[in-house]
């Protein structure tokens, strides 16, 4: 008779603590594991004081026991936990980024944009974990189908950071006939600043010379989104 994971010699309880989540996954599938057990597999091994599962629980606690909050932690944040060195922290950060990209890749796959709601839902996925402002652009073709999404700058949205020339150069490379400007407000405040409005107008006016339309400028935060077009500002 073939051996199973329930045999006394192969039962999960007989494996070393750090190996148990891996064997549990092999026996019952990844869905059967808790968040801490999945993280423990990535951490790989513990130390003399704590098992990989113990370290995983500390990582989760640092992320307020919430995977969304966990995704906001930097490598530096994770290495504050004794037993989590740069290598382990980099592995965790890479896994969390893959999860985010997987979610984002299915959210807006070359689809036709019908409303600000379509774009805002996508932006909430791709920009939600940034603790600082990023400025991005969605490039669309004549049929309002998305050709490309790109984060243009990080750390602010002043005219020197979000350079209209850079945006329009990229629009021409992507053969875009229209664009949607996007940025996040980590503070949660959705009200556009005077700098937001001035930059939008500057890019809109510059785009006219290339027959490129600025369809909208959308600000997202954890509290929702603000659409320049919906509010009649654009």
Image: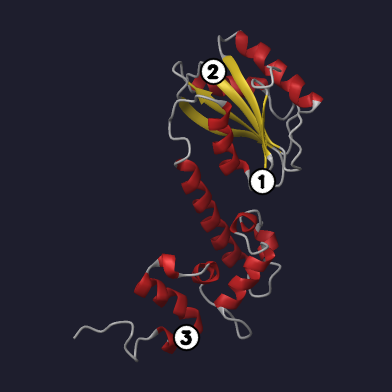
* Residue 56: % across, % down: 59, 71
Q: Is mark 3 on a helix, strand or loop?
A: loop
Q: In this view, does 229 lie above or below 89?
A: above
Horizontal side, residue 171 vs residue 234: left or right: left
Q: What element carries label 2?
A: strand
Residue displayed at 59% across by 34% down: 120
The residue wearing badge 3 is: 16
Q: Is residue 36 above or below residue 150?
A: below
CB contact under 8 Å: marks 3 and 1: no
Q: What element carries label 1?
A: loop
Name the mark on residue 202: none
The residue wearing badge 1 is: 130
Residue displayed at 57% across by 31% down: 117
The residue wearing badge 2 is: 178
* Residue 40: % across, % down: 53, 72
The answer to which of marks 2 and 1 sits earlier in the sequence is: 1
């Amino acid at each position: 008779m073939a051996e199973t994971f329930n045999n006394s010699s192969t039962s999960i309880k007989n494996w070393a603590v750090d190996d148990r989540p891996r064997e549990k996954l092999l026996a019952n599938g990844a869905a059967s594991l808790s968040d801490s057990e999945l993280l423990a597999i990535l951490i790989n091994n513990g130390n003399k004081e704590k098992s990989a599962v113990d370290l995983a629980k500390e990582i989760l606690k640092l992320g307020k026991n919430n995977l969304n909050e966990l995704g906001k932690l930097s490598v530096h944040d994770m290495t504050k936990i004794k037993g989590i060195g740069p290598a382990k922290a980099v592995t965790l950060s890479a896994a969390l980024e893959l999860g985010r990209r997987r979610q984002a890749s299915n959210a807006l796959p070359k689809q036709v944009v019908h409303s600000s709601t379509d774009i805002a839902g996508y932006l909430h996925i791709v920009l939600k974990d940034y603790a600082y402002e990023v400025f991005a652009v969605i490039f669309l073709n004549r049929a309002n189908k998305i050709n490309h999404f790109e984060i243009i700058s990080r750390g602010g949205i002043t005219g020197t950071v979000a350079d209209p020339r850079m945006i329009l150069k990229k629009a021409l490379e992507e053969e875009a006939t229209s664009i949607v400007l996007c940025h996040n407000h980590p503070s949660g405040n959705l009200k556009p600043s005077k700098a937001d409005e001035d930059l939008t107008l500057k890019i809109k006016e510059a785009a006219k010379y290339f027959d490129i339309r600025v369809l909208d400028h959308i600000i997202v935060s954890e509290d929702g989104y603000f659409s320049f077009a919906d509010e009649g500002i654009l």
